[in-house]
Image (cartoon, rainbow, N blue to C red):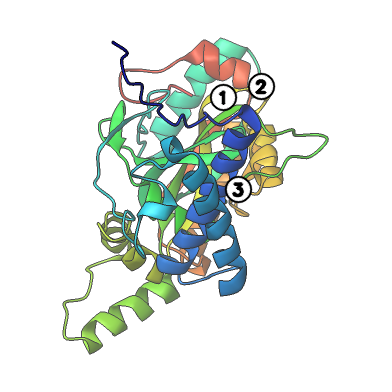
Amino acid sequence: MSAGCTSLARVSSPDADTRGRWQELAEEVRGHQFRYYVKDAPIVSDAEFDALLRELQAIEDQYPELRTPDSPTQLVGGAGFATNFGAADHLERMLSLDNVFDTDELSAWAARISAETGADTEYLCELKIDGVALALVYRDGVLVRGATRGDGRSGEDVTLNARTIEDVPERLTGTDEFPVPSVLEVRGEVFFRLADFEELNAGLVAEGKPPFANPRNSAAGSLRQKNPAVTARRRLRMICHGLGKVEGFTPASLHDAYRALGAWGLPVSTHTTKVRGIGAVAERIAYWGEHRHDVEHEIDGVVVKVDDVSLQRRLGATSRAPRW
């Protein structure tokens, strides 16, 4: 008595090159979908996009295991581009700032710094933008996450919305002096320029909707839209003002760090000044007190930081704010 045999067709697994091409295509197609459906700013023709999508579909037809639920071939239109505000842990704690309200408090703070250094200290004087804090994470130069401050340890994941901000690059560009680090966590402020805020409110009123009370509230509300296409239509801006976790870059000074950020294509302020001694700091504070209305966005004072990174480490931080 002989037993019958049934032969089963085997589907081979993709090799490393095929997997790499699939990953490359999936990311490219997803990026074009995002620019088309969310930002309304495509950079390729429909024919070019269709060719990429067909190549991706052909690979998945040959190797069905690559056809994952989140593959661009399985999503219709702008489906999948929604912000769910899940928790996102910061790579390093995202601290706040301590305030001083008069020259006596400023001098007392500077005296503590001088006691540590024994000399006049170099400071950076930056405008304190009245906006909402955002942390960006880049891995090998590619934007992988954007998160709000939250409690300083964990914030809300707003990556899709952050990607719609004109100033936020999807990919960093390195230079000979400043190669792109393997990991970069950069902090900054998202805000509205005053002219854009007025235009936004005028549009809301024309639609019979209540206007925002101030630019800061409008920036926070715009960054936290569930539909990133709404965020994309609002002209949010960003300026970077600090680093979190970094691998592959060790700046000697905050001034050098800002130079690197600018070289990589990240937005930095043109109003930041490096000065020596607390007297020069007081002069910058007085200057911006008189010229605050000359700036394109609202400001809430001047942020003063020790420029030397090694000194920053010696000074350390409290549970809520840096001592430097």
The circle on residue 266 is: 3
Residue type highlighted by circle 3: Leu
Q: Nearer the viewer, mark 2 or mark 1?
A: 1
> Which of disc 2 and disc 3 is earlier in sequence?
2
> Which of disc 1 and disc 3 is earlier in sequence?
1
Q: Nearer the viewer, residue 59 or 295?
A: 59
| Coordinates of residue 219 in the picture (x, y in percent) | 33, 59
Secondary element type, mark 3: loop
Residue type highlighted by circle 2: Thr
Give the CA separation, mark 2 to mark 1: 8 Å
- The extreme front residue here reads 1
| Coordinates of residue 37 in the picture (x, y in percent) | 41, 67
Residue type highlighted by circle 1: Val
Give the CA separation, mark 3 to mark 2: 17 Å
Q: Is residue 277 visible?
A: yes
Image side of residue 92 versus residue 285, left or right:
left
Q: Which residue is mark 2?
A: 250
- Residue 290 position (above or below residue 110): below
Q: Where's the N terminus, which quadrant?
A: top left
Secondary element type, mark 2: loop
| Coordinates of residue 314 in the picture (x, y in percent) | 53, 11
Q: Which residue is mark 1?
A: 246
Q: Quadrant of residue 19?
A: top right
| Coordinates of residue 64 in the picture (x, y in percent) | 43, 40
